[in-house]
Image (cartoon, rainbow, N blue to C red):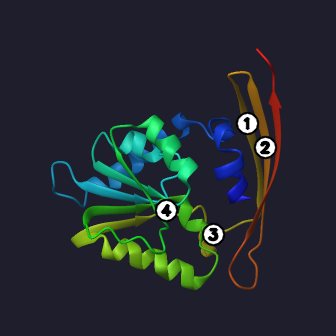
């Protein structure tokens, strides 16, 4: 499903999740990070940055470089925040020969389907983090508080409309969970 959302349905992404939905969360991340950074304007690498919604708000306080595997996602982020550098890369393998005050991985960490992939993503974060720096990883769920659930939403905009239903099930014996989406799209000629 992630392939479909970030590739085939990328132009619909702003109707799946709204930019403004990220402001409160970005403010919270900054509040937490600012307690542990002394730099006036810390550097930040965001791995798995998607459409750049977090960075849109975090750039107020940090010098952010974005990285995502999906070319469509990072080109979309480039349109949203053209002032930031965007690097196409896989969070499991990326090596920039640069270090940052903060390395941030938001919900894209949830796409790591094996413990090996998770270890690789964490290793990438570690090699890009300055000594004494901060790695902030914010998954959608952690095992200790996971609960199966459903969620729904959608938006209208620019002659298009999207409605979605998300069904989250698990945990499975291997610690993974499933997210099934039903997405309805409507496009009207103007």
Circles 1, 2 touching at the beta carbon (< 8 Å): yes
Circles 2, 4 touching at the beta carbon (< 8 Å): no
Q: Earlier in the sequence, mark 4 or mark 3?
A: 4
The answer for how far apart the CA atoms under marks 2 and 4 are is 23 Å
Q: Earlier in the sequence, mark 4 or mark 1?
A: 4
Is residue 113 placed above or below 76 in the rendered structure?
Answer: below
Left or right: where 182 falls relative to 138: right
In the picture of the structure, the residue carrying the numbered disc 1 is 154
Q: Earlier in the sequence, mark 3 or mark 2?
A: 3
Q: Residue at x 48, y 43 (%)?
A: 77
* 1 vs 3, front mark: 1
In the picture of the structure, the residue carrying the numbered disc 3 is 145
The answer for how far apart the CA atoms under marks 1 and 2 are is 6 Å
Is residue 9 placed above or below 67 in the rendered structure?
Answer: above
The answer for how far apart the CA atoms under marks 3 and 2 are is 24 Å
Element assignment for label 4: loop
Q: Residue at x 40, y 37 (%)?
A: 81
* 2 vs 4, front mark: 2
């Amino acid at each position: 499903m992630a392939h479909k959302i970030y590739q085939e349905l990328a132009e619909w992404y702003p109707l799946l999740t709204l930019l403004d939905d990220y402001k409160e969360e970005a403010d919270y991340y900054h509040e937490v990070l600012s307690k542990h950074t002394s730099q006036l304007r810390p550097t930040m690498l965001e791995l798995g940055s998607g459409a750049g919604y977090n960075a849109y708000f975090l750039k107020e306080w940090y010098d952010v470089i974005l990285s995502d595997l999906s070319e469509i996602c990072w080109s979309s982020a480039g349109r949203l925040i053209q002032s930031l550098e965007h690097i196409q890369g896989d969070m499991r393998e990326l090596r920039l020969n640069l270090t940052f005050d903060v390395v941030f991985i938001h919900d894209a960490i949830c796409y790591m389907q094996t413990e090996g992939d998770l270890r690789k993503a964490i290793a990438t974060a570690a090699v890009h983090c300055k000594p004494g720096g901060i790695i902030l990883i914010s998954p959608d769920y952690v095992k200790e508080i996971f609960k199966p659930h459903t969620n729904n939403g959608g938006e209208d905009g620019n002659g298009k409309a999207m409605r979605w239903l998300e069904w989250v099930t698990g945990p499975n014996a291997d610690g993974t969970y499933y997210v099934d989406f039903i997405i309805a799209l409507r496009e009207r000629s103007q």
